[in-house]
Image (cartoon, rainbow, N blue to C red):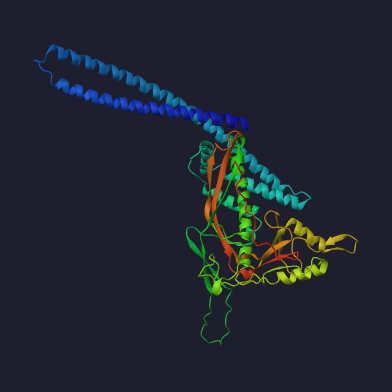
Amino acid sequence: MALRALMLARKIAELEGRQTGIEQERAALTERIAALETRESEAERAFAEITTETPQEERDAFDAEAAEIEREHGEIDAAQTDIDARAAEVERDLTAARTELDGINQRAAEAAAAAGRAAENNHATEEERNTVNTEHMSRRERIAEICTRSEVRDFAAAVRANRAVGSPALAIPDVMLDIIADEVAEQSKLIPYVDSQTVKGSGRAVIMAGVPEAIWTDTFGDLKPVDLNLYRMSVLGGKVSNYLAVPNPLIQDNDVNLVNGIISRIAAGQARAIDRAILYGTGVNMPVGIMTRLAATAGTGGAAPAWWDATAPEFTDIHTTNIGHASSASLTGLELFKALATFLGKAKHTYSGTGRKFWAMSEATALKLKIAAMEFNSGAAIVSGVTSTLPVIGGDIVELDSSIIPDDTIIGGYGDQYLHVDRASVEIRVSDQVKFIEDQTVYAGVSRHDGKPKAGEGFVAWSLTTSNPASTTTWPTPASN
């Protein structure tokens, strides 16, 4: 089926090329008709000037011109008939090829949707594995559904057709934006925990310092005002972009595979970049990260850093209170968790929200905590008191790649105290020149995001070593071409 789709795509491209050539011939014929009409008008004026006194030579010249005009009319009529016949044939073949290709894409979409429904109805004994498969197929089923819509089919056709340097950006259809946003949020480990909002254009996000408590009064007393403590945080937005090479056979495949491949690849790269920025963003062409806020120090006269808004809550220097480390390298077991819980408890829920906590760490750090909490249960089996949440202090353990957060480092707190802003929808740019030899087409995903902690007091950072955790990260550099 994929081979047939490829053959049809090539046939459609060839027919569209013939169609363009025919239209060019039609345009040239139109110019020829206009010139002939001008020539005929001049002949009519010459005929009107012929009298009985007109010399025979001029009469003969007019007769020759009239005969030439009649001959030209005949050629034009024949050419018009030929162009119309060839245009009708190409249009007929093009309609048939497009209809067949749409049918293949429709059957592929229906097959993917059926597979998704089958996966959801398949209750395997391993519940966790079944849940993962169901979620995956559910997303693919959504993609299969939107691929039946005309705007998505047009987008897929534009992706296949506009593979050239200098091609304009391809606007992603609105129906795809929700899936892309969901995919970025799904692949991002931190977006589900923070306060994520969409703000278009240059704007400010309004936050409220806590929920004002109501005031008790006499039954017949006046209503009492409370201070809402509203603050504004400027959100500008840095551009996050990534490009990836997609094998050309995938591009030539059906619409479902093409759209699914582009969405998953671009979303994965952007999700990693956003996670790193939430933790370590510098505030320069990117969000302000949690560690950047925690490590920030007050300047002369208690001045706040440049990225701190004048309309935001008052800046506080917390680099000595909310960043810490283990007092001894020999801390293990209960003593380690006592020290950990004591320090992580410094995170304060300053602003209104859900109060949900997260603790970001590498996989090796999470494993180290699980080992430290190991003990024997009543059945003489080794168990750990650490699973997906931290004991006593509470909060989900979020495991990130060690290239994003170093081993032995824990960063976290109240996630809703971090404001993440989606500033501009994703657009796709495309070129088939960079990876021409590898038979690949390069797609670039570009979007804009901003973010910063509403209050640094909502977060802490702690190291399992005897030194404070690093406040910066090594940002990826562009790969060489």
Residue found at x 14% / y 22%: 48
Q: For residue 111, what is the image quadrant?
A: top right
Q: Residue furthest left?
A: 53
In the shown orientation, is residue 235 left or right of residue 356? left
In the shown orientation, is residue 177 left or right of residue 60? right
Q: Residue furthest front?
A: 300
Would you place residue 476 above or below residue 379 in this image?
above
Would you place residue 298 above or below residue 5 in this image?
below
Q: For residue 329, what is the image quadrant?
A: bottom right
How many numbered marks appear?
Answer: 0
Give the camera-side residue of 28 and 340.
340
Q: For residue 148, what is the image quadrant?
A: top right
Tell me the quarter of the image containing the C terminus. top right
**What percent of the width, then of the height, locates residue 311?**
50, 70
**What percent of the width, then of the height, locates residue 474?**
64, 55
Give the camera-side residue of 451 and 93.
451
| Residue 96 visible somewhere in the drawing | no
